[in-house]
Image (cartoon, rainbow, N blue to C red):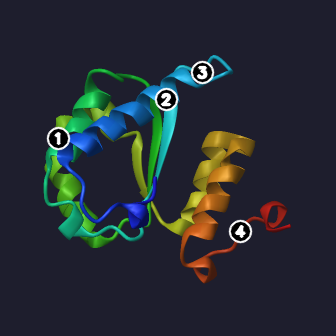
Amino acid sequence: MSMQHQPPASSSACIIEHMAVVLEAACTSTSCGAWGFDVVCDCRGFQLSKNLDPRPAVAAMEMLKHAYRGRLRHAFLVGAPSAFNALWRMVKGLLPKRTQEKIQFISVKEATCALEKCCGNGASVVLQLLYDSKDKASWKLPSELAE
């Protein structure tokens, strides 16, 4: 997901429903028999003013804790600004320590290595989206994707 594409105004109920649909799709669309999923959140463009209502973040933590317990393999929060830390500090205690440890804050430059290590060749699609998204000059796309 990309924070820069977050709509200017959405109801908490709509955001929570959307998250549930995305998580369910992640669990049911695996053709390889995978049981878990990885999350990549491009936090560039995060605006605290669009995220003052904590209900969607709390709902996400509750979904990961109960309905999708154990299914999160990795979560990469890419390029999170300092304003994101306030939200994270508020909700991280809702997750078990084991789940908290699966969540990594990484820079855009670190994303290439982290995603390739985690997802192998599957990382190329996500990396291309990150690269096309914003700040193209701030990091280099792997040579095999640049062609």
- Mark 4 or mark 1, earlier in chain: 1
Q: Would you call the spot at circle 1 few (<14 residues within 10 Å), some (14-19), or many (20 or more)?
A: few
Which residue is disc 3 drawn over? 34
Q: CA distance from mark 4 to mark 1?
A: 35 Å
Mark 1 or mark 3: whose residue is earlier in sequence: 3
Q: Which residue is mark 4?
A: 141
Where is mark 2, residue-wise? 25
Where 133 falls versus 120 (above or below)?
below
Name the residue that disc number 1 marks.
93
Q: Of helix, strand and loop, which one carries label 4?
A: loop
Distance of mark 1 from mark 3, alpha carbons? 28 Å
In the picture, measured across the screen, residue 60 lies left or right of residue 91, that is right
Q: Nearer the viewer, mark 2 or mark 4?
A: 2
Say what amino acid the circle numbered 3 marks: Ala
Q: Secondary structure at mark 3?
A: loop
Give me the C-alpha separation between circle 2 and circle 4: 28 Å
Q: Is residue 132 visible?
A: yes
**Secondary structure type for disc 2:** helix
Q: CA distance from mark 2 to mark 1?
A: 26 Å
